[in-house]
Every structure is written in structure tokens, then in C-alpha cells.
Image (cartoon, rainbow, N blue to C red):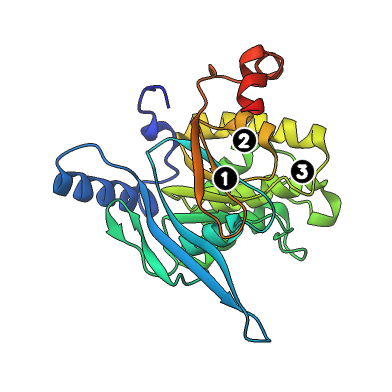
Amino acid sequence: MRPAPDRRADVRLTSEGPGLEFDRHERRAASRCGGKMAVLRVQGIRKTFTTGDDNHIEAIAGVDFAVDRGEFVSIVGPSGCGKSTLLSVIAGLTRQDAGEVYLFDELVRGTHPLLGMVFQEESVFPWRTAIRNVEFGLEMRGVSAKERRRKANQMIDIVGLTGFEEHHPTELSGGMKQRVAIARALVMEPAVLLMDEPFGALDEQTRFLLGEELLQIQARLQQTVLFVTHSVSEAVQLSDRVIAMTARPGEIKDIVHIDLPRPRDTRTMESDAFGKHVAR
């Protein structure tokens, strides 16, 4: 990702909590390795599932890659190649058979407060308003009502939902519900935001518009993102790099650098360069 000024002071939601934990992890790990380092490293991940009839299905056959701070990296590949399984392993929701995940050069075992997750399936709580959905993780963490409302309001504004704070999910469109889910993950100030086909259930126009908005949010927060999608054009639209996986068992076939200028908009997608990346 091209160099950008450090605006963390402008976007950190509070002087307490995960924001400082993020910085402490990074400084400690960088001091050990003597300088710049990846935020996330995945080494030799393998996963095999056993079915009810005792058949063994190898989902992931050894995957290695790293993600730098502020990068937007997408994973594409055919259905069943292990993309979502890989993301679930990184998030600590699925246990791998072999390999390791490192965050700031520290081994990750299980879920981690600096790894946020947005799922494809609708995951907002229907009985909570938009703002109370965004507050949920902070509430579970024990943040005071006043502080979590302040942080939630700021994130509601960042994702473009001002005016819909007290609406329940049944009163929101599919795209707006995904904005709530994204805000709920981002308000926890993750070092890496993991997104598993978050726009997969939406129509093409809404996907494109949310993609543009996601890029604006990512640039504003300098957020590191690892994004799973079936859409090659969506991956090219959003990413600094695209990891292409093979059919099952999933391995990395290629990593493509997307050298399109930012910000990216409709003119970018109409360019010859965009078409060449998609074709590749």
C-alpha cells in the first residue's frame, strides 16, 4: 500500500483499551525483529475434516502469506477451496491440524481481541437497535455506558448510518445491516479486520457501492483488512494484493499485486488496467 500519513491520533476512539494494546503489541514485536514487520503472518496452515462416514476431506493443504499494516488483501478461489475455513482458522474459530498464525510476531492461540470478524451471514441482533448492536462488544468488555455510546456514535458516523441509530434491523436494508456489522467489528479497534464474503448476499450495485464505502473507511482508519470473496472484480476493486487459491485442497496458486491508483471509483473499474487485472 502506498505510504500515507499516520492519522491514528485522529481515528482512535479512546485513549484506553484495544488501541493502546494494538500499539504495545506492535512496538514490542518490532523491537524484537529490529524494524518493520508484518501485522499478520500465516505459516503452513493445514486443515482436514472427517465426515460422518469416516472419509477425510483435506480442505487446506499448506498456506503461507503475510499481511502488512494498512494493507487490503483479498483471497479468491473456487467454491470449496478452503477460503472461509482459512479465515476461520485465523480468527481462532476453527482449529488447524498444522501450521501457525502470528499477530505482530506473537503466536495466536484461539480468538484474539485484536482480530475482528465480519461474516457473510446476517449477524446483527434483531432485538437490538443499530447503535446497541455496535455497542455489544464494548458492553461485553465492560466499557462504561457513556464511553461505549460515545465510541459507537463515532463509528456509526464513520460507516454512514447517522440518523439510523435507533432503528432495528428489520427497518434497515441488507446493505445497512452489513454497515452495522462492520461498525460493530471496527469499534473494537482490531489490528486486522477479517471479512468473510460480507457482501455476498447483496445485489451487484449495492456490493459495488459498499465496496467504495469500505475503501473510504479503510483509508480513514488505516485499517488492515483480510477479505474473502468469490468475485474477482470485487477483489481487484478493493485490494492491494489478491491471493488466488487452487481448488480443494486449497493452496496458494498466485499472489497478484494490484497497482491501480487510489482512491478507486467507477473510472477505475472502466480502465484498461482494471480489466487486465481481472482477466489475469
Give the residue at mark 2.
235
Q: Nearer the viewer, residue 66 or 147?
A: 66
Regarding residue 170, the answer to whether it shows in the image is: yes
Regarding residue 144, the answer to whether it shows in the image is: no
Q: Earlier in the sequence, mark 1 or mark 2?
A: 1
**In front of the other: label 3 or label 2?**
2
In the rendered image of this protein, does residue 101 appear above or below residue 198? below
Q: Identify the image quadrant of the N terminus.
A: top left
Considering the numbered disc 1 on the image, is that residue within a helix, a strand or a loop?
strand
Pinpoint residue 168: horizontal percent, then vertical percent.
79, 56
Q: Nearer the viewer, residue 177 or 67?
A: 67
Q: Earlier in the sequence, mark 3 or mark 2?
A: 3
Q: What label does residue 227 carry, if any? A: 1
- Give neighbour class at mark 2: few <14, some 14-19, many 20+ (Cα, 10 Å): many
- Residue shown at 61% from the left, 30% from the top: 236
In the rendered image of this protein, does residue 248 appear above or below residue 34? below
- CB atoms at circles 1 and 2 under 8 Å apart? yes
- Give neighbour class at mark 3: few <14, some 14-19, many 20+ (Cα, 10 Å): some
Q: Identify the image quadrant of the C terminus.
A: top right
Q: Nearer the viewer, residue 171 or 243?
A: 243
Pinpoint residue 29: horizontal percent, then vertical percent.
22, 50
Pinpoint residue 256: horizontal percent, then vertical percent.
50, 32
Per the model, the C-alpha gap separating discs 1 and 3 is 17 Å
Q: Earlier in the sequence, mark 1 or mark 3?
A: 3
Query: Which kind of residue does numbered mark 2 sit on?
Result: Ala
Give the residue at mark 3.
175
